[in-house]
Image: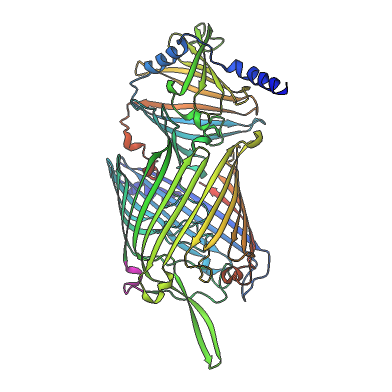
Amino acid sequence: MRLMTAVLTCMAIIAPLAHADDGGKGLAIAQDRKARDAGWGDSQAEMTMILKNSQGETSDRQIRLKSLEVQDDGDKGLTIFDEPKDVEGTAFLNFSHVDKPDDQWLYLPALKRVKRISSKNKSGPFMGSEFAYEDMSSFEPQKYDFNWLRDEPCGEGEETTAGSTCHVLESFPKDEYSGYTRQITWLDTKELRPLKVEYYDRKNSLLKTLTQSGWKLYEDKYWRADEAFMENHQTGKSTTLVTKSLDFKTGLTDGDFNQASLSRVR
Amino acid sequence: MRLLTGLLAIVSLPDMAFDFSAEFGVEGRRFLEEGAYDHQVDDEYALSWKPEFVWEGDSSEFVFTPYFRKDFQDPDRSHSDVREAIWKTWSGPLELHVGVSKVFWGVTESINLADVINQTDQVESPDGDEKLGQPMIRGIWLSESWGTFDAFILPGFRERTFPGEPGRYRLPVPFIDAQYQASEEDKHVDYSMRWSNYYELFGAPLDISFSLFHGTSRDPIYIVQETEFSEDLIVPTGIIPYYAQMNQAAMTLQYSLEGWLLKAEMRHRDILDDEFEDEDADAAVTGFEYTIVGPLGLDFDLGLLMEYQYDSRGKESLAQSQNDMFYAARIAFYDMDSSEILMGMTQDLDFPGSRLYSIEGNTRLNSFTTISVRALVFVANPDDEVMDFIKKDDTLQAGLTFYF
């Protein structure tokens, strides 16, 4: 009897997570989102990361982000820290993969040491921020199972998105070491931009909300948000990522993303 | 200072961006017991300054990082060094570096056996983690399919730094002038090569490196100099650091399996001086680091480390990592100040009474200041000679670093 109760309890917990059959609509939307962004090539951005703790104290980081589109696999990303000064030159290199865990390295300039980050640590915070290492990875549809929930008004927001309709999409990470059971993403139906993402932790309670605003069109084709605001509902902490400059097709190649040459990254 | 920066900016090449930054350090440490030997002090204070000048271009850069340190108690700990003065240029997968620089080879935490290029700056840190700049000509080939190849020509040798008479972590008698096997002494040209790559093994990455070195050993052999006062009175009066020629082959491995980092480093050394044949050694260190992200929902990562150290020279030799276990826990807090604590214990398995406890922590005070604290406790088995020498050197240390 007790076993029966346990089984039923388990089922009750699992049931809401079972991926409802949406006839492949969720996956189609996600693939469309990725396809519309194809061809961006490479980009370089300067950003300010503003960390805020539950007491409202803030701390800034100045970072640069280099990105490279990779055909038939996940993209490559390199984040370089300029401030605070004690972490100046620290570099985070990410090779996103569609069918296996990402490769991630951290270069620590004081020690001249390149450290590999184990794939299970992806749910840990990225440099003390509310972004996890896995949030720094590129969006790859192959990494998730999708479930289209509904279409609804996108809600209050800025001019570019106000009054528009959003697809509400549930995505379940395939990676068992993800810190999330699922994410719910609001994509505007017109441009398929992720305006809002809710992250649910391993216990399936709401952990974080990402709100992206200040959308700009680059190269007449690629939408990027100027501001990404990540709020942690469980700790009261938040992180805002503000883009100061962003350039596409800057001539980056594979050679700029090598874990063996992180020491000359500046 | 601003004038100096200005002058340096002017001399920079037209197409190169110039950047200047500096670290200023204040450090104090207290030894909890009176020194075992005459003249040793109980408190030590030091200041340090490390400016960095960088000229950066599209396909080359020059980095100049001198280092200055003033110790108010031990004149041998006051020193200056060129940590880096290196010109780097690159084109596609090829790089050439010429000048003075530092490189690090290693994966393990407690000891690094392959890391052979730079000399240890022993006065900076008793754990040997700080290194002196090394003159080098270095060629690198970053091959997409074959991994990374490194070749080094190392003209010139740096002697290890040692604390002086007032200092701690030393032997009963002072270090005196170094001696060399090579007739060129510290002008001997050394060579080294290294290959590294990573592969996928059962779906997880395996990092591997293999390296060769021929030249002057960075680790001195310690020769006791004895003075004969009379027929019955022969007294050790100094320790000569003797730098022999050697060949070394070394390998490092790291297998990153989910939350586990499985690590190993091993090396074989041939000392090319027949008189010191018993210094030939095989050494290895192997272990793991296992990280738990936010244990019990707490706001930090907990890393658990365990490593076993082996050296074939055995317990009769001065080799310290001959048969030892290292245990440690690392706590990395989820705060804005990058706070971290590392607690460790090294247990000698040949001498059950010999162990070293250490705890160190660091955090950021504001956008340009960090603080670090460290405590070391040495427990010695009387039969364990080396540990017995430093058993009175339990330490509390604190330091502030300012970044500009």
Q: Position of residue B230 (x, y in %)?
A: 54, 93
Q: Which residues are magenta?
A: B181-188
Count the marks: how many?
Answer: 0
Residue B40 location (% of width, % of height): 62, 72
| Horizontal and vertical percent position of residue B231 | 53, 94
Residue at position x 48%, y 81% from top?
B225
Most distant residue in the front direction: A1
Q: Does the magenta segment cover residue A260?
A: no
Tell whether B382 sits left or right of B219. Answer: right
Q: Is residue B174 above or below residue B142?
A: below
Please say whether residue B51 is visible from this viewpoint.
yes
**Relative to A246, does residue B346 appear above or below in the rendering?**
below
Residue appearing at x 61%, y 16% in the figure: A15
Please tell me whether the stretch drawn in magenta is mainly helix, strand or loop.
loop
- In the image, residue B363 above or below residue B223: above
Nearest to the observer: residue B87 or residue A13: A13
On the image, which quarter does residue B266 sit in?
A: bottom left
Q: B276 or A161: nearer the eye?
A: B276
Q: Nearer the viewer, residue A3 or A266?
A: A3
Towards the viewer: B242 or A99: A99
In the rendered image, residue A90, in percent from the top left (x then y), is placed at 46, 42
Choose top left, top right, bottom left or bottom right for residue A35.
top left
- In the rendered image, the residue lying farthest to the right is A1
Q: How is the image coloured?
A: rainbow
> Residue, x 67% and y 70% (percent of image)?
B34
Query: In this orientation, does residue A107 appear?
Result: no
